[in-house]
Amino acid sequence: MARLAAIMMACGFVSMAGCGGEGRAPEEGPGETSLLEAIAGPPLAAEERVPGPSYEIARMVPGAEVEVSRRPGGPVAFTLTDQTEFGSQRNFWVAKRQGGWLGVPLADLANGELGWIRYEAEALQLLQTPYAIWADISEQRLRLRYGKRILEDFGVGTGGPGSPTPPGAYAVTDGIAGSATRRYYGCCVLALTGHQPNLPPDWIGGDRIAIHGTPDGAGGGTSAGCVRASDREMVSLFARIPLGAPVFITP
């Protein structure tokens, strides 16, 4: 529960009974894995090619450490191990490149800021994924894209008037599922690198944002900043998206 408490971020506390009987694993499709396999992240193909955009992922080698700078070639700001605070294997979305440096969104930094990591084959494995999540706040819709294809398109809930979901480009850091998540997050949670800068005055949790489930309807601006989907939709999303994949939240 200590780990889960750290992700009681900007999601809003609601009464949930669990995943419910309607949640089901999706049918087989391109790149899909089971829900349990997705907790560690679906496998990525180093040379996968599908029509449309593809995104570079840097996966840390087990046991490795990387030094993070705030600009390419700058002094070391901090060091990261191969696992996140929630115990996932650490994967970075490479949003920019400059020479041998990789610019990556990190939960350790502010929204919109990139950490810069020097590429070293001993510490990082470079992969490609065609998966990306696009969430539109004004439309209250989430779309899972696989290159040019839209695999999922469903309604979501986002932050309320006083704590709107912050737009930006983020990455998935962790997939969390199990009985410990159900009270507040339904079937499962995709934790993101982003932060909520406008928390409610009486908020006692952290400021990380996430995409998470609820056994009830997900519509309406009812969270403190997270994106909420129904458990039925969330199970399918959770079973497809790899750790490190980009998440674009638009106004």
Image (cartoon, rainbow, N blue to C red):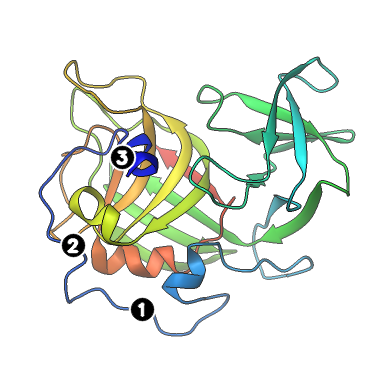
Along the viewing direction, whichever of 128 and 1 lies nearer the viewer: 1
Residue 24 seen in the current view: yes
Instruction: State the residue position of label 3.
Output: 226
Q: Which residue does the image show at 37% across and 35% down from the upper left?
A: 6
Tell whether label 3 touches label 2 (CB within 8 Å): no
- Among the two numbered marks 1 and 2 on one chain, the one whose residue lies closer to the N terminus: 2
Upstream in sequence: badge 3 or badge 1: 1
Tag 1 secondary structure: loop
Q: Can you say whether 140 is above or below 21 in the image?
A: above
Mark 2: amino acid:
Gly
Q: Tell me the CA gap for discs 3 and 1.
A: 23 Å
Q: Mark 2 sits on what residue?
A: 18
Q: Determine the image quadrant of residue 1.
A: top left
Q: Which residue is mark 1?
A: 25
Q: Quadrant of the C terminus?
A: top left
Residue 45 on image: x %, y %: 72, 69
Left or right placement of residue 177 versus residue 83 in this view: left
**Rendered image quadrant of residue 80:** top right
Residue reaching furthest front? 2
Q: What residue is at 88 percent from the left and 49 percent from the top? A: 121
Residue type highlighted by circle 1: Ala
Q: Residues within 10 Å of mark 3 (few under 14, many from 20)?
A: many
Question: Which image quadrant for residue 11?
Answer: top left
- In depth, the one of 116 and 251 nearer the eye is 116
SS for dot 3 = loop
Q: CA distance from mark 2 to mark 3?
A: 18 Å
Q: Residues within 10 Å of mark 1 (few under 14, many from 20)?
A: some
Compute the Cα span from label 1 to label 2: 16 Å
* Residue type, label 3: Cys
Q: Left of 139 or right of it: where is 39?
A: right
Q: Locate residue 206, reporting x and y percent.
A: 34, 28
